[in-house]
Image: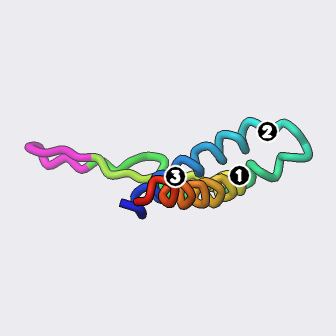
Amino acid sequence: MRRTVIIVFCVLGMIVGIALGEAVSSISVLRWLSIGGEIGFKTPLTVDLSFLQFTIGIWCKISIGGVIGMVLFAFIGRLVTRWIKI
């Protein structure tokens, strides 16, 4: 349960960090927060077997702001798990 809470906080931290990095990218001093890259497939792979069709795709965006947010939220997640004694 403890790991699940910390993983959820890490994902939330990555989302918040990327959003903040994009929001402050117009400010020249904070532009470095939006530096990053994308990993994965932009167009998903579709397999059609006439009776079954499924689509496979994965894409991830990573930025400096996202990594900083993930680390901060991981520490917050640890504090929360200690506070609620999981």
Kindly identify the amino acid type of the residue bearing the numbered disc 1. Gly
**Residue plotted at (54% across, 61% down):** 78
Few, some or many residues within 10 Å of mark 1 (<14, 14–19, 20+)? many
* Magenta residue check for 53: yes
First of labels 3, 1 by sequence position: 3
Q: Nearer the viewer, residue 78 or 21?
A: 78
Residue lying furthest bottom in this view? 3
**Secondary element at image label 1:** helix
- Circle 3 Cα neighbour tier, 10 Å, few/some/many (<14 / 14–19 / ≥20): many
Residue depicted at x 73% and y 44% = 21
Find out whether the residues at labels 2 and 1 contact each other: C-beta distance under 8 Å: yes
Place of residue 41 in the rendered image (x, y in percent of width and height, measured from the top left): 46, 53
Task: Residue under label 2, please give it.
Answer: 24
Q: Which residues are magenta?
A: 47-54
Q: Is residue 6 at all visible to an observer of this figure? A: yes
The percent position of residue 15, horizontal first and vertical second, equals 57, 45
User: Is 23 in front, or is 76?
Assistant: 76
Residue type, mark 3 in image: Phe
Position of 4 with respect to 46 (left or right) is right
Which numbered mark, 3 or 1, is in the foreground of this view?
3
Camera-side residue of 28 and 1: 1
Pick whichever, 47 or 30, lies toward us. Answer: 30
**Residue position marked by numbered label 1 in the rendering:** 65
Q: Indicate the quadrant where residue 50 lies.
A: top left
| Residue 11 lies in the magenta stretch | no
> Disc 3 marks which residue?
9
Contact check, label 3 and label 2, Cβ < 8 Å? no
Horizontal arrangement in the rendering, residue 31 relative to residue 13 (left or right): right
Work out which quarter of the rendered image holds the C terminus and state it: bottom left
- Residue 81, how many percent across, how many down? 48, 57
Disc 3 vs disc 2: which is toward the camera? 3
Q: Position of residue 56 (x, y in %)?
A: 32, 51
